[in-house]
Amino acid sequence: MLFRIEPRAETSRFMKHAAPLLSALLAMAAGSLLFLFIGHDPAYAFYVFFIVPVSDLYGIGELCLKTSPILLCAIGLAIGFRANVWNIGAEGQLIAGAICGGGLALQLQAFDGIWVLPAMFVAGALGGMAWAAVAAFLRIRFNANEILVTLMLTYIAGLFLSYLVYGPWRSPTGFNWPESTALHEAARLPRLLAGTHLNLGFPIALVVACAAWLFIRHSYLAYQMEVGGKAIKAARYAGFGRHRMIWMGLLIGGACAGLAGVVEVAGTIGKLREVVSPGYGFAAIIVAYIGRLNPLGIVLASLLMALFYIGGEQAKVTLGVPSAITGIFQGTLLFFLLMSDLLISYKLKWTGFSTASGLSEPHGNG
Amino acid sequence: MKVIYGVARPDAGTILWEGKPEVVGSPAYARRLGIGMVFQHFSVFPALTVLENILLLSPKGTRRQELAARISELSQEYGLPVNPDATVGMLSVGERQRVEIVRCLLQEPKLLILDEPTSVLTPQAIQELFVMLTRLADAGHSILYISHKLHEIRQLCDTATILRHGKVVATVDPRQETDASLAHHMLGTLVPSLSKGTSAESGAQRLIVESLSRRAETVHGVDLENINLTVFGGEILGIAGITGNGQAELLEAVSGEWQSPSARNVCIDGTAAARLGVTRRRRLGLVYIPEERLGQGSVPGMSLVKNGLLTVQVGKFVRWGVIRMDAVRQFASKCIEEFDVRPATYAISAEALSGGNLQKFIVGRELLQAPGVVVAAQPTWGLDVGAAQSIRQILLKLRASGVAILVISEDLDELLELCDRIAVMANGRISEARAVGETSIAEIGRLMSGEHEPVPANAAGA
């Protein structure tokens, strides 16, 4: 072996915070290079992907719109991740939230009070929590791995939504499309800015992020969860019950993802349909880590992730490349982040052939 | 020694082996030269069996059955019983070290390096080890013995080289020295001697463990059988024994990390507490200083401020679920100041402190809560002589104020110096506590090896 991976004596605090930024730049650069290989001018592709989408007010509105659900999911996940609760099924909890929030709106079509929207948010949060609670219960009762359970529950939620929009909730006037009737005005998030699609979902997500920041920084519960995440034995020693951490981690994650579901249904989409999220819940996992599980970092990271989404759409229109390019950017971003994290804690040491020579020349005169 | 064994490389200088300069490029090469090493921190694979672990370091083509036979033979010869087919992960720490020693001896090394080998052995086993080492030395093997136990060095070694902060400070004939003069070399200053003082006359039964039995939850665990012990106010009760004989299980049962179904198994200051959790036992005045400082007693990656909050009664420090950082910071500063933690800054992360300073912080955090009962596991394990002495002095001061103290330790010298009474744990049972003056090292050693079974277990509650 020519290289050896060795732990570093000291890890740089600066690099720890700079690494997400560096990975973002590297991912952008690598992505642009990719365009070169498929026959596009990389500089122009970069311009189309990252500059054009946010060059006007409308584009910025779209960016914020996409950011909202990602941010909400990532915030909830980060709180769980800090306690080593591996909820990776925010996507499913988002769908459960969309079903509950959207379903409630469909039942309340006769009402147009100001309370309709808050009721939808409560229902959505409860739906997400219920979906996550299944995983928490199975984990505690049967020690079932929450990574697998939350992931599998995502598919169940997706198929259940399909069943609803193909079956009982299908719009009678929708030309047989698998979607519900459009939500009535009282169940829609109000627009904030003329000339854009920006709605109340974005400020709601920011408020949740602020609340999470306060919670993490000042609450005793978050402290206990962090101890559980950093040193499980210390948590036991201190008497912080593990079960409570698992419940809290999953329920908070589920509630936030549920809110994201309502934001999508009541905001951008305006009805229930077969697909309510192009994988925001999964993107949120990457976002939580790029943001270093810190709410402020997560706000920035979710803006970046949203840019990947709309950049991908823009590239599809302008350059004619498949929108799967978004997934490639997500992947490279995560790859570079993991790589820099490895290099922050470890160093590559050039060993050359010295180990081998030490063996083959036992009487070498060092 | 890592350089000698080929684990690390020297920046400068040469090593002469049998008169020739050698570059020891790897441990495998060191072994081929005839250098064997037993590390203090074990380098065995827990998932493999003893035999497989040894096979890994054996020359190619070694037959399993032959090796197993040789292991049994060798371990018989030197009184180091190991079962070749046991999975290492299931062995106690003491047994794991035996595997290491046996593995080393199998290679018939010319130079045997031992790093703190006696920390997990009974006094008899130490004597046996010494006999064996002397035999090896007489047969022409060289032995490099690293230890901070000065009397061992004086008993065993022909020459002693004393290192301080990576520099050789003296080379002496240990047989001509005293413990005090060796310690003086090691520290550069004189070690403060321990003043035992008098014990308080309170005499109340502050911690009682009664008929405690517990089934092991994992295959690695040890069943506790009918444990009885009483710690009076103003006394230090020591529990001797080799790690892995039920100490961890007993500590969990006393601290509240494990709760017994029968409440009277553990009484703290008269309250039946065995069904209470950690926090509620702390409210009764119990504090616990765990063996593992980083990762159990403190959280790595968290500042001393946050580590100060770990075990305190939250009343003063948390309002409406919100941490009152000012109060916690004050507490951490007080802890650092009163217990002389260095560097004296609460912003520092726990893992950045030396073992001794971290232990002082943990001890301080626990003792500032005005405890009635203190449980300490290996309180001075791995600390330098100065820090160890100051921890012991703190415990003695606490004893004088009427606190009941339970110390579980492998360091017999420490227990003899510190305790009023000593009990011995072996195979999940505990012997009757005897006053230090009325027992002997020989007797304790016999109990440690489990030869003499105490009262037959009546298996109450099992």
Image (spheres, coloured by chain):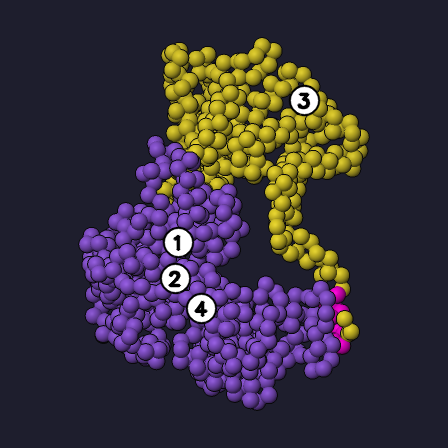
Q: Amino acid at mark 3?
A: Pro
Contact between marks 2 and 1 (CB within 8 A): the answer is no
Find the distance from the CA under tag 4 to the CA under tag 3.
62 Å
In the depicted structure, whether residue A281 falls above or below residue B209: above
Q: Which residue is mark 4?
A: B93
**Would residue B172 be seen by someone viewing this image from the given angle?**
yes
A12 with respect to A365 (left or right):
left
Chain coloured yellow in this rendering: A
Contact between marks 2 and 3 (CB within 8 A): the answer is no
> Foreground: A276 or A67?
A67
Determine which of the numbered discs, if any, sits on residue A53 in the image: 3
In the depicted structure, whether residue B91 falls above or below residue A81: below
Residue A346 location (% of width, % of height):
64, 52
Q: Nearer the viewer, mark 2 or mark 3?
A: 2
Residue A159 location (% of width, % of height):
47, 34
* Structural crowding at the residue carrying mark 4, measured as other residues with C-alpha within 10 Å and reported as few (<14), some (14–19) or many (≥20): some
Determine which of the numbered discs, if any, sits on residue B363 in the image: 1
Q: Secondary structure at mark 4?
A: helix
> Foreground: B68 or B121?
B121
In the depicted structure, whether residue B273 falls above or below residue A88: below
Contact between marks 4 and 2 (CB within 8 A): the answer is no
Q: Tell me, yes or no, whether dots 4 and 1 are on the same chain.
A: yes
> Foreground: B177 or A46?
B177
